[in-house]
Amino acid sequence: MSASGTANRVKEGARSAATKVEEAASEAVNNPVKAKNDFLHTPVMRAALPFINGGLAGMFATACIQPVDMIKVRLQLAGEGARGGPKPSVMGVTREVLASGRVLDLYTGLSAGLLRQAVYTTARLGFFDTFQNMLADRAKKNGTQVTFLERGAAGLSAGGLAAMIGNPADLALIRMQSDGLKPKDQRANYRSVFDALKRIAQAEGVTALWNGAYPTVIRAMALNFGQLTFFAESKTQLKQRFPDLSPSANTLTASAIAGFFASFFSLPFDFIKTRLQKQQRGPDGTLPYKGFFDAAGKVIKNEGPLRFYRGFGTYYVRIAPHAMITLIVADYLKLITA
């Protein structure tokens, strides 16, 4: 083929491609809904949307709830190792934080919290929705309904997988929030979550970023079982029992139910996780706790079993609204991207 013939073919190809781009752009302007739907219904986007929606919902909820989470961590760490110990109140901890700095101190660790949601909630809601869709497709083929046990297995699996992925950000969040409890000359004064991750890895090794991973995974499985499983089940039951209930009322009621069960099932594991992630080696090189069961045993022996539920009210106020906001926003995002 001659050089001129090749050049003409290239020109025709370029002209054809430009025409297609122009037509696509014109279609997007004249029919934006169709253009949006075409993009959102590509196989890649359908697979990615549960994860994207979950991450955005979790980050939005964290920005709203971060001050409560900060107070919850301080309550859990107060009186460590002593059965009698101090019994701080929510108002007392809040006044102490404000007296030692500024109102923005209640947002200490926000960058870590947002990173954790970007990783952890993206994964857990994404995995859960993916598992739910698989279960729904299988049930439809078999002419059956998705059972509570199947939803429970989906919630447990999604929580465990996501917790392993998100543990470093979770650990950095605990370190940043507990740093203010140390004497001023012993504080790390982390500048951001990335600074915390870098300095922890340098000082203690990369594997230290997965300290407390075992209770974190268990806690996440318990929380997701309570939150996602009961949310999905509650929505189904409410729709069947109260068919006149509006979709927004259904979602709000189901998310409130899910928030309670998420708090109840996960608080003991969250308590131990906080203790393990906060601990650092003493002058003799040893850690206060050897692991999950050692920490649980020492808390029961030295502080009493009810210590696991210290701050339940604060934890519920932190978990329930976070769960509700996350689930409501995620549901809304599903609606507009359907």
Image (tube, rainbow, N blue to C red):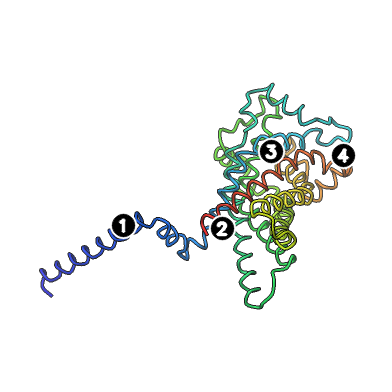
Label 4 SS: helix
Which one is earlier in the sequence, the residue at label 1 or at label 4?
A: 1
Which one is earlier in the sequence, the residue at label 3 or at label 2?
A: 2
**Image location (x, y in percent) of residue 224:** 70, 55
**Image location (x, y in percent) of residue 79:** 81, 33
Q: Nearer the viewer, mark 4 or mark 2?
A: 2
Q: Are marks 4 and 3 in contact (CB under 8 Å)?
A: no
Q: Residue at x 19, y 67 (%)?
A: 12
Extreme residue in the bottom direction: 142
- In this figure, which residue is indicated by the disc labeled 3? 69
Which one is earlier in the sequence, the residue at label 4 or at label 2?
A: 2
Q: Are marks 2 and 1 in contact (CB under 8 Å)?
A: no
- In this figure, which residue is indicated by the disc labeled 2? 50
Which one is earlier in the sequence, the residue at label 1 or at label 3?
A: 1
Q: Residue at x 62, y 36 (%)?
A: 109
Which one is earlier in the sequence, the residue at label 4 or at label 3?
A: 3
Q: Looking at numbered disc 3 in the image, what kind of residue is underneath it?
A: Asp
Could you tell me how far apart the alpha carbons at marks 4 and 2 are, in whole angstroms? 42 Å
Q: Which quadrant of the structure image shows residue 104?
A: top right
Q: Nearer the viewer, mark 2 or mark 1?
A: 1
As drawn, the label of residue 26 is 1
- In this figure, which residue is indicated by the disc labeled 4? 303
**Image location (x, y in percent) of residue 103:** 63, 26
Extreme residue in the front direction: 244
Label 3 SS: helix
Q: Looking at numbered disc 4 in the image, what kind of residue is underneath it?
A: Glu
Q: Residue at x 84, y 41 (%)?
A: 307
Q: Looking at numbered disc 2 in the image, what kind of residue is underneath it?
A: Pro
Q: Nearer the viewer, mark 1 or mark 3?
A: 1
**Image location (x, y in percent) of residue 315:** 75, 41
